[in-house]
Amino acid sequence: MTLVVDYVRIDKSEIEETGEYDLEGLFIRLGLAIDSIGAKRVALDTLEVLFSGFQNEAILRSELRRLFRWLKDRGVTAIVTGERGETSLTRYGLEEYVADCVIFLDNRMEEQIATRRLRIIKYRGSKHGTNEYPFMIEEDGMSVLPITSLGLEHEASRERISTGIPRLDTMLGGQGYYRGTTILISGTAGSGKTSFAAQFCKAACEREESCLYFAYEESPDQIIRNMRSIGIDLQPYLDSGLLKIHASRPMAYGLEMHLITMRKFLDTFKPNVVVIDPISNLTNVGTQTDVRLMLTRFIDYLKLRNITAVCTSLVEHESTAGINAEGISSLMDTWVNLRFFENSNERNRGISVIKSRGMGHSNQIREYLLTDHGIEIQDVYLGPSGDLLMGSSKAVQEAEELAEAVAQRQNADRKKRELETRLKSLDTQIASLNSEYETLKEELDRLVSDQQLRNEALATGRSELVRIRKADKP
């Protein structure tokens, strides 16, 4: 590939118009440059110089028409730049009529944030989009993203991956999230959203999967330090390259810049898992509608690549009725809500699964603790009235139930001992009665036997007396 750059200096102060003139000199110079390298493409930047150097616009307009025809006849693709007019696309309102394709570039400032946008005004013989397309100019060229979603043609994975918290896996049907889905973790300040996201990151890295973490509130070192305080050490995975944290303030760029930056990291790092923490901070650089459109495109991009994404969102109210999660909850496949519950002058954390597409999930609210060895989800503990008990109320209720159980056990032991004593007493009585029975029975048997002997002796004596007296037999 060969490039020729020809600079033509036109100084208005050095030009005096007299008689008739044309741009034949420019044609000759262009023709020589094109023929010298066999150019297929020509860029003229910018036509404004020609208009600023000459006063006779009628001749210039005629010559510009001739220039466009001449370029077509040479079979080259030409790109001509021109400045925007006050009431027309170009300052002199000519170029857009003679050109086959007109691309309008705009650099718009909104809320002190500039965003470049591109729009195709016309493109003869081609079906083209009519929306505005934000674009960026970077060190490796221009990046243009469509303003609308990429589509819904992605395949849905059946594979399940752990959340990093076994009991949360249980709440999600026992196997965790579907791979390639989007998960929203919402909650008020201090509810532990980042901790849940970091726990998921750690679980992914333990599976030897790469994880890309977009942080919009804390620096990488701050995230590492804070998560280490609850037993989630991400530093080894950061050192091994499995984890990459990109931290920036949302106000540093516009939404489209964030979107392009994210896509750039996705294309280069190729992660299995993505975390955006918190996604709600993006509303600082755009309206809720803009954020929703931007996230829709980003989520579709993630789904096409089967990347699982966890997004955290800060909400203002504890009640789920007031949660809109920046209007993006409908885009999410799974929504886990973290809440504070106030009771007995203390605040306790509770977790619930609001929705999880494609799986049966728990509908219970459960207490969770941020311990020095990670996140622990507690058993559901209901009080006598059926209300969920947490914190000290749960401890008091547990102590009362334990005391009652001890009292019942002690009462049962006492009754057992009393019954055993009574049984022993009865056994003794029974043994005594048995002994007395045997004694009386022996005495009775002896009396019967003696009586029988006496009767036999008396009968024998009578027989002998009859024999001695030789009495008649009866």
Image (cartoon, rainbow, N blue to C red):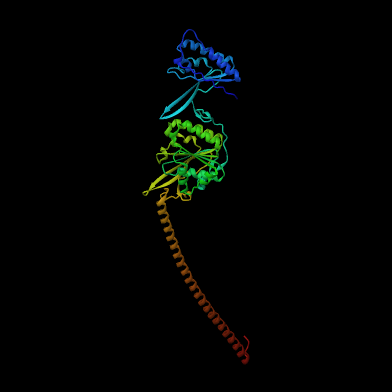
Residue 339 position, x and y percent, is: 42, 43
Residue in view at x 44 percent, y 28 percent: 114
In the figure, 261 relative to 344: above or below?
above
Residue 222 as seen in the image, left or right of residue 447? left
Q: Based on the displayed image, in which of its 4 quarters is residue 178 positioned?
A: top right
Q: Is residue 319 visible?
A: yes
User: Looking at this rendering, what residue extends furthest in the front direction?
Assistant: 14
Residue 399 position, x and y percent, is: 41, 56
Residue in view at x 46 percent, y 46 percent: 225
Residue 231 position, x and y percent, is: 48, 49
In the figure, 389 relative to 463: above or below?
above
Residue 193 position, x and y percent, is: 45, 42
- Of 266 and 295, which appears nearest the observer? 266
- Of 329 and 99, which appears nearest the observer? 99
In the figure, 281 relative to 98: above or below?
below
- In the rendered image, the quadrant that contains the C terminus is bottom right
Q: How many marks?
A: 0
User: Looking at this rendering, what residue extends furthest in the left direction?
Assistant: 345
Residue in view at x 43 percent, y 46 percent: 349
Q: Is residue 173 visible?
A: no
- In the rendered image, the quadrant that contains the N terminus is top right
Residue 269 as seen in the image, left or right of residue 217? right
User: Looking at this rendering, what residue extends furthest in the top direction?
Assistant: 19
- Of 349 and 71, which appears nearest the observer? 71
